[in-house]
């Protein structure tokens, strides 16, 4: 019996955000030499929001919704994420507090 390919649906909890990291592009030096992305050791600090949680609750139990939405491109702290693999693709999960800016 053949196993069907089933896509996984991910819904982050609380104030967490699922991001698809932006690819690191090759860097061109002024000398014309290209430095490939494989030689860069830094992880991307930008990504596109794929899914968001419902928000965080304050001490009174009121829900505070997230300010980012699906489709936003964001900058995030380079040390404040968890790497996950979903359907053979790499994603990051970050808390909203680790998002530094929404890029317009």
Image (spheres, helix red, strand yellow):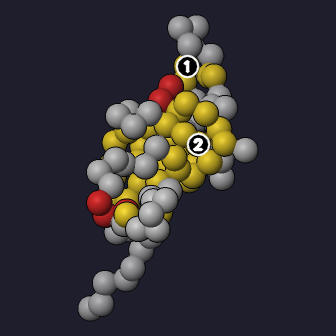
- Percent position (x, y) of residue 52? 56, 43
- Percent position (x, y) of residue 93? 42, 43
Residue 58 falls left or right of residue 94:
right
Residue nearest the observer in this picture, 64 or 69: 69
Q: Please tell me which residue is depicted at 34% across the width and 42% down the height of the picture.
A: 82
Residue nearest the observer in this picture, 91 or 102: 102
Residue most extreme to the top? 60
Badge 1 crowding class, 10 Å Cα cut-off, few under 14, some 14 to 19, many 20 or more, is few
Residue most extreme to the right? 104
Q: Which residue in the protein does label 1 denote?
A: 57
Indicate whether 96 appears above or below 22: above
Image-quadrant location for residue 31: bottom left
Tell me, yes or no, if residue 50 can be seen here. yes
- Percent position (x, y) of residue 46? 51, 47
Between disc 1 and disc 2, the foreground one is 2
Residue 26 falls left or right of residue 96:
left
First in sequence: mark 1 vs mark 2: 1
Q: Which residue in the protein does label 2 denote?
A: 74
- Percent position (x, y) of residue 81? 38, 38
Query: SS class of the residue under badge 2?
Result: strand
Indicate whether 84 appears above or below 35: above
Indicate whether 81 appears above or below 23: above
């Amino acid at each position: 019996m053949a196993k069907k390919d089933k896509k996984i649906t991910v819904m982050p909890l609380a104030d967490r955000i699922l991001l698809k990291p932006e690819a690191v592009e090759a860097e061109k030096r002024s000398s014309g030499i290209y430095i490939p992305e494989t030689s860069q050791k830094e992880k991307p600090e930008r990504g596109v929001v794929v899914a968001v949680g419902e928000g965080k609750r304050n001490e009174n139990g009121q829900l505070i919704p997230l300010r980012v939405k699906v489709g936003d491109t964001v900058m995030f702290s380079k040390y404040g994420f968890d790497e996950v693999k979903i359907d053979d693709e790499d994603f990051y999960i970050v808390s909203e507090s680790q998002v530094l800016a929404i890029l317009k």
